[in-house]
Amino acid sequence: MKSPVVKRSIVIAGHKTSVSLEDQFWDALKEIAANRRSTLSEIVASIDSGRNQGNLSSAIRLYVLAHYRSPAPGREAVEHAERNGSLRSTVA
């Protein structure tokens, strides 16, 4: 089933702009903002200021993809400890 692209208005650095994204990307972006205790506008402004080319919608999609592809902070250390036996489960 094809997800429709939804156009929404957002304020970035005091300027209102519209961004077209699928609902799944809007939801993921809201989740990222909540986890970082940031606003959606702050996250989008950061993405906007960091892009060199392309449109904002594409930049947001790439940002969300990169976020979910990268390991969670600390996850690598936990996985390393588990592989080396230095992290023991306390659950019996």
Image: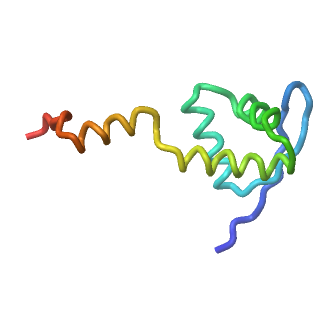
Identified at 67% across, 51% down, the residue is 25
Determine the residue located farthest toward the bottom in the rendered image.
1
Is 23 situated above or below 63? Answer: below
Give the left or right position of residue 64, taking residue 87 as reference: right
Quarter holding the C terminus is top left
- Picture coordinates of residue 79 (x, y %)? 31, 42
Q: How many labels sit on residues?
A: 0
Give the left or right position of residue 55, taking residue 70 as reference: right
Residue 75, picture quadrant = top left
Closer-to-camera residue (76/27): 76
Give the color scheme: rainbow, by chain, secondary structure or one colour: rainbow
Is 22 situated above or below 41? Answer: below
Closer-to-camera residue (80/29): 80
Quarter holding the N terminus is bottom right
- Picture coordinates of residue 71 (x, y %)? 47, 43
Give the left or right position of residue 63, taking residue 50 as reference: left
Closer-to-camera residue (22/67): 67
Identified at 65% across, 43% down, the residue is 29
- Picture coordinates of residue 17 (x, y %)? 90, 40
Determine the residue located farthest toward the front in the rendered image.
84
Residue 24, picture quadrant = bottom right
- Picture coordinates of residue 44 (x, y %)? 76, 36
Identified at 83% across, 46% down, the residue is 56
Identified at 54% across, 32% down, the residue is 35
Closer-to-camera residue (52/34): 52
Give the left or right position of residue 86, taking residue 65 as reference: left
